Image: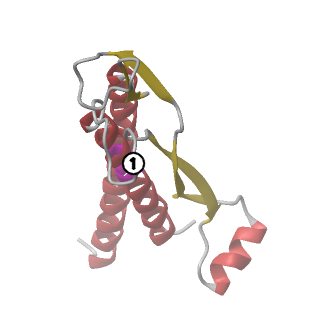
Amino acid sequence: MDLLSSLRISSSGLAAQRKRMEAHSSNIANAQTTRTAEGGPYRRKEVVFGSEPARETFSEILEGELSENAQTVHATEVVHSDKVVYKHDPSHPDANSEGYVAMPDINPMVEMANMIEAQRAYESNVTALNVTKQMATKTLEIGRGN
């Protein structure tokens, strides 16, 4: 695997984790939203990841067939949950005739834990990216013949 493949893999991880952070922060921000443009309460978002071989050129494809397969990650889709929690609050403007309000099924503690996990994965990808850059810099210094 060359340096550009390492950079490509790390950057795909950064993009995927950023999308995950966006989904969880949106869930936290809308934990109490009972009315959306689509109608009904806000629906919880969850990002689904997928992988694909980290190859673009013919030589990378050939090398990939001969060695271990490096994979990049990407967010394949954002899934919206259909779960709704009913809370008894007759004074709420969106309450039904029995006094229940349809609320999003979002647990802020779970969302925060998921955000911290995404942050850690993002930081790991940044570290891998920086190490790759340092290796490239050191390689160029060798070529100077100090």
**Who's the residue at 38% across and 26% down the image?**
96
- Please name the residue that numbered disc 1 is placed on: 39
Direction from residue 78 to residue 135 in the image, left or right: left
**Residue type beneath disc 1:** Gly
Quadrant of the snapshot with the C terminus = bottom left
- Stretch in magenta: 17-21
Direction from residue 12 to residue 59 in the image, left or right: right
Relative image position of residue 100 (x, y in whole percent): 38, 20
Direction from residue 112 to residue 63 in the image, left or right: right
Relative image position of residue 71 (x, y in whole percent): 61, 58
User: Crowding at label 1, few (<14), some or many (≥20) Cα neighbours within 10 Å?
Assistant: few
Relative image position of residue 19 (x, y in whole percent): 38, 53
Q: Residue reaching furthest right? A: 66
Which image quadrant is residue 112 in?
top left
Residue situated in front as seen by the camera: 39 or 132: 39
Direction from residue 62 to residue 35 in the image, left or right: left
Q: Residue reaching furthest front? A: 97
Q: Is residue 19 magenta?
A: yes
Q: Residue reaching furthest top? A: 88
Relative image position of residue 85 (x, y in whole percent): 45, 23
Residue situated in front as seen by the camera: 57 or 42: 42
**Who's the residue at 33% across and 26% down the image?**
95
**Who's the residue at 52% across and 59% down the image?**
74
Q: Is residue 116 magenta?
A: no
Secondary structure found at label 1: loop
